[in-house]
Amino acid sequence: MMKYSKATMFLFLFVLLFTLGCEDNHEPEIQRGEIVSSKKTLPLLTAENINQFLPSDSIHADAWAEYNIEAYSVQYYTIDVHGKQTIASGAIYVPLSETDVSFPLASVHHGTIFRREDVASVNPYYSGEGIWIAGNGFVVACPDGLGLGVSDGIHPYIHAKGSAEPVVDFLRACRTFVTEKGIELNGQLFLAGYSEGGYVTMATHKTIEENYADEFQITASAPMAGPYDIEGMATTLLSWDTYDQPAYLGYVFMTYNTIYDLNNVHEVFQSPYAEKVPFLYDGTLNGDQIRDSLTIVIADLFQPSFIEGFTTNPEHELRTLLLEENTLLNWTPEAPIQIYHGSADVIVPYSVAEITANALNITLVTFENRNHSTAAIPSISEAILWLESYVTLFAENP
């Protein structure tokens, strides 16, 4: 029988323990888009019920809902802003048909949400646009986004990567979900969203074409009233005397402060707001509560040195982050894009849409004398018609 020296045995044990230690610490493979759970949240909503909630004076006759729908809440694996695996949530709306029909898939993105629970996965009625578009014959995926629904942490508000990657994974989850349910898709993919949802739509379109074109082919997308040129928008707003929605400004700052570890809240905001801002975006307060904690006066909210530095220095740290990583003007779309905006919008200034349309050479549909709120319904109505004009495979299966 072979014998080993103590040194040899020690070496053997050391290697064994080292190997086991490496195995214990091995990061699990990221299963992006894999479904964690799903449940039905809306057994049936009729087309008649959907249309009762739509204001008739702002809707094109051909944009009324025609299909009854049902809704599901889905949890799935995605990655956070640092590429680590996490669980997120969203809603899927399915149109119902008595015949064998293949439906197009649409990813529809919500406007600004502050409270973690005010999302479609928690309450399907929170996505009126998702319900409306599904009623027009689209299987609709409505991702909550990171930091909302079941997801913890700060919502990556107006952050390109943090907005787009969870959408890509929810599209994967949605494809798996409809396959398991025996629902036929026609192979077309559409994107749409209003306000923050407009930004998410544009960021997702760009991300898919640059990074996932071998997996997804976008048919067309309709971003509406989004802050695509956020560097230009920020510079414009800082030149104003007042801005009626300061909660949005703090939201953007806290996103960047958290993701990029800036730790400069007192360099950006004046007291007492510098002390308040870090505690306003934990997902428990609504927009009105946050607004009431701040001020609409720009010169009172921000430090004079920050306003001066940001508006005059192109190399300013925050401005560089906005421009290089998150402003959506530096690309060339392949699939058709049409953007929508109200000419009287002062929440996301109309000039943002004009600059974006010129930079990307895309069509801008303008709603004269409509502001951020009053342009929403006509924008979605016209976007539905435009997207439907690209639905070429919507027919009974052979």
Image (cartoon, rainbow, N blue to C red):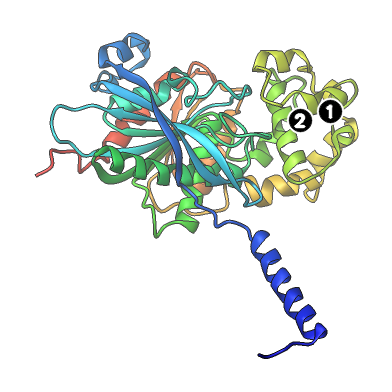
Q: Is residue 139 left or right of residue 162?
A: left
Which numbered disc flags the more N-terminal residue, 2 or 1?
2
Q: Residue at x 81, y 83 (%)?
A: 6
Q: CA distance from mark 2 to mark 1?
A: 9 Å
Q: Nearer the viewer, residue 253 or 309?
A: 253
Q: Residue at x 62, y 37 (%)?
A: 158
Disc 2 marks which residue? 238
Which image quarter holds the C terminus?
A: top left
The percent position of residue 338, horizontal first and vertical second, equals 41, 38
| Quarter of the view holding residue 277 | top right
Instruction: Answer few, some or many: residues within 10 Å of disc 1's Cα (few below 14, many 20 plus, some between 14 and 19).
Output: many
Q: Nearer the viewer, residue 313 or 135?
A: 135
Q: Amino acid at mark 1?
A: Phe
The percent position of residue 103, horizontal first and vertical second, equals 25, 37
Q: Amino acid at mark 2?
A: Leu
Nearer to us of marks 2 and 1 is 1
Disc 1 marks which residue? 302
Q: Nearer the viewer, residue 265 or 146?
A: 146
Q: Point out the residue furthest to the left here.
A: 398
Q: Is residue 217 left or right of residue 113?
A: left
Q: Residue at x 30, y 41 (%)?
A: 180
Q: Nearer the viewer, residue 53 or 94?
A: 94
Instruction: Answer few, some or many: residues within 10 Å of disc 2's Cα (few below 14, many 20 plus, some between 14 and 19).
Output: some
Is residue 42 depicted above or below 304 in this figure?
Answer: above
Q: Is residue 381 among what the camera can see?
A: no
Mark 2 in CB contact with mark 1 (< 8 angstroms): yes
- Under circle 1, the secondary element is loop
Is residue 98 depicted above or below 371 in this figure?
Answer: below
| Quarter of the view holding residue 113 | top right
